[in-house]
Amino acid sequence: MAGISIEDMADEIMNGLQEYSELADSAMKKAVQKTASQVKKEISSNAPKRTGKYGKSWTTKKVAEKSHSLQIVVHSKNRYQIAHLLEHGHAKRNGGRVEAQPHIAPAEEHGAEKFDELLKKYLN
């Protein structure tokens, strides 16, 4: 072990903590990006298919990125109007209801689990 004086010990500890902080930030951002793309793929593959345009309309968008945070939104580019109706069902014009086809909520739950798993993997 290299000889470090007591006066330099605090500086060395701070350097080590700074290095780990940068590692943790990059690991977190990598996990967020990978999770967002997997959630998008899962929503697209489980989306109701009539013409296929709704499933293909899902995309990811970086909302904000700072030195210690990254926000990515998964959304439907041009079919956002029907996402809620398909996910939760809706009333028909002449009575009755259209059955809900949940495809967003399960992907969101899997994404939360996957994010935790990836973050632990990248930090180890």
Image: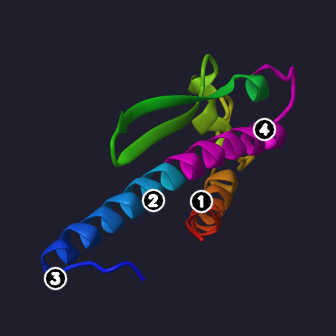
Which element is circle 2 on?
Answer: helix
Q: Residue furthest top?
A: 78
Q: Mark 1 and mark 2: span between their CA atoms?
A: 14 Å
Q: Which residues are magenta?
A: 29-53
Q: Are marks 2 and 3 in contact (CB under 8 Å)?
A: no
Q: Which residue is mark 3?
A: 6
Q: Which residue is mark 1?
A: 115
- Give whichever of 109, 6 is nearer the camera: 6
* Residue type, numbered disc 3: Ile
- Give whichever of 81, 74 is nearer the camera: 74
Q: Could one spot residue 97 in this view of the protein?
A: no
Q: Is residue 39 magenta?
A: yes
Q: Which residue is mark 4?
A: 47
Query: Which one is earlier in the sequence, the residue at label 4 or at label 2?
Result: 2
Residue 24 is tagged as 2
Residue 67 falls left or right of residue 60? left
Residue 59 is tagged as none
Q: Nearer the viewer, mark 4 or mark 2?
A: 2
* Residue type, numbered disc 1: Phe
Which element is circle 1 on?
Answer: helix
* Residue type, numbered disc 2: Ala
Q: Nearer the viewer, mark 3 or mark 4?
A: 3
Q: Mark 3 and mark 1: span between their CA atoms?
A: 40 Å
Q: Nearer the viewer, mark 1 or mark 2?
A: 2
Q: Mark 2 and mark 3: span between their CA atoms?
A: 28 Å
Which element is circle 4 on?
Answer: loop
